[in-house]
Image (cartoon, helix red, strand yellow):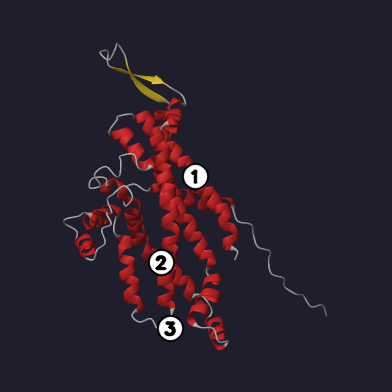
Amino acid sequence: MTTTIDRPAAPRPASTAGRGGRARAASLFLTPFFVLFTAVTLIPIGYAIWLSLFTERNSGLGFGGTETVFTGLGNYRRALGDPQFRSGFVHVALYTAFLVPLMLAVSLTVALLLDSAVARAKRFFQLTLYLPHVVPGILAALVWGYLYTPGVSPVVSAMRSGGIGFDFLSPTGVLPAIVNIGIWMSLGYNVVVFYAALQAIPRELLESASLDGAGAARVAWSVKLPLIRSSIGLIGLFAGVGTLQLFAEPMLLNKVSHGAISNTWTPNMYVWAAAFLRNDAGLAAAGSILLALLAGLLSYAVTRIGKPWRNL
């Protein structure tokens, strides 16, 4: 007697109609994104590149109006040859050199304190520290501009009554003043990131270190920080790239700094001044394209440098 074994039928290939339906559904969901991306990103970039190739010149000894002429890379040469544009990058570099290390140090210290066993009311402090991050940069600059202004600021008055005569709005004081605003705004976000990374550390490792006689400071330095170095590295790298966007804080402090901060103190301010104070749209467009190219190169470098950090 022969026994017949029923074998399962081979799966049928997906029909062409089914694949076509999924493709149409994907296109339906992706179309709004590509429309918005084209409208708010690609078209403005293309228009800025187009503007950067032209400039307006007076004709007829100034009595014949202005004419738009093709200048090619002339606006780019003007921007790169302008000392004010180059000095803006120097200010941003100094701002980055002070902000990133201080921001990382303060954020890590607070996150380690919150992660310690003796910390109380952790949720309350997390929320309190995160609140400055949701405050727009313009409002933060207005608040700190008030706190920096002599004669009206209770902070400056208290410092002077204690014998500290530091002027936050002097040429040497504006950089620390802006760095302080940057730390105040980014502290809460970075603390949340670092605290989440610290919470992911297996508690067994910390208990083992404590049983071996390591104190709290030793555990933090030798166990916790090495285990979250990927988060530290990526936060530092992205913060460095983000400093190229510096605009609102020095722009608003410019109104009360009595000349310590010029209208071209950062590259973004230079572009704004070229567009709205000098009415030179070509120069402003060229400056913005150069700034975007630099940001793109730095972002690419961050992604390349960040690969080893993600594997740690």
Q: Residue reaching furthest bottom?
A: 211
Q: CA distance from mark 1 to mark 3?
A: 42 Å
Point 58% across, 52% down: residue? 304
> Any mark on residue 261, and which?
none
Q: Earlier in the sequence, mark 3 or mark 2?
A: 2
Give neighbour class at mark 2: few <14, some 14-19, many 20+ (Cα, 10 Å).
Answer: some
Q: Which mark is residue 296?
A: 1
Q: Are marks 1 and 3 in contact (CB under 8 Å)?
A: no
Q: Secondary structure at mark 3?
A: loop
Q: In terms of depth relative to the viewer, which is nearer, 270 or 132?
A: 270
Residue found 16% across the figure and 57% down from its top: 152
Q: Is residue 43 visible?
A: no
Q: Amino acid at mark 1?
A: Gly
Per the image, label 2 sits on a secondary structure element best described as helix
- Crowd band around label 3 with a 10 angstrom C-alpha radius: few (<14), some (14–19), many (20+): few
- For image coordinates 38% across by 81% down, the residue present is 119
Label ID, residue 106: 2
Q: Which residue is mark 3?
A: 117
